[in-house]
Amino acid sequence: MEVVLIGKAKTQVKINFAITAIVASNSNAGSLDNLEKLIMGILAAMPAGYVVGQIEKPTVLEVGQSPMLVADINVSTYYTQTT
């Protein structure tokens, strides 16, 4: 969270999020395709006012005994409070 003060009557806060997209890592080509489709779906569902930053490169994450393919999507938005 980053606070931006605008005068005395308005406070604006930048809120940063990391959304993690995760799919099963069964086959390399299929998993990459599934991850890409999931990321595109997440971006399509993103509400107005959110800014998409960097999408991290896919990495393999072991969850229990199952390999998963994951990628983080960095997004941010501003919340403005007026008094």
Image: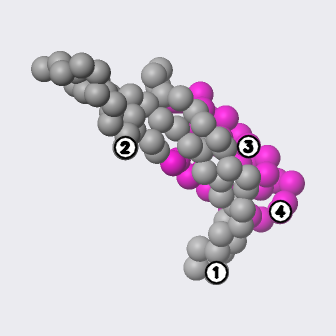
Q: Three-letter amino acid code at disc 1?
A: Gln
Q: Residues within 10 Å of mark 2 (few under 14, many from 20)?
A: few
Q: Which residue is mark 2?
A: 1
Q: Residue at x 71, y 40 (%)?
A: 37
Front in this rendered view, residue 47 or 7: 7
Q: Which region shows up in magenta?
A: 18-46
Lower sequence index among marks 1 and 3: 3
- Mark 1 — residue? 65
Q: Three-letter amino acid code at disc 4?
A: Ser
Label 4 environment density (alpha carbons within 10 Å; few <14, some 14–19, many ≥20): few
Which amino acid, by three-letter code, is at mark 3?
Answer: Glu
Seen from the viewer's position, the closer of residues 65 and 16 is: 16
Q: Secondary structure at mark 1?
A: loop
Judge whether 9 appears above or below 15 on screen. Answer: above
Residue that label 3 marks? 36
In front of the other: label 2 or label 1? 2
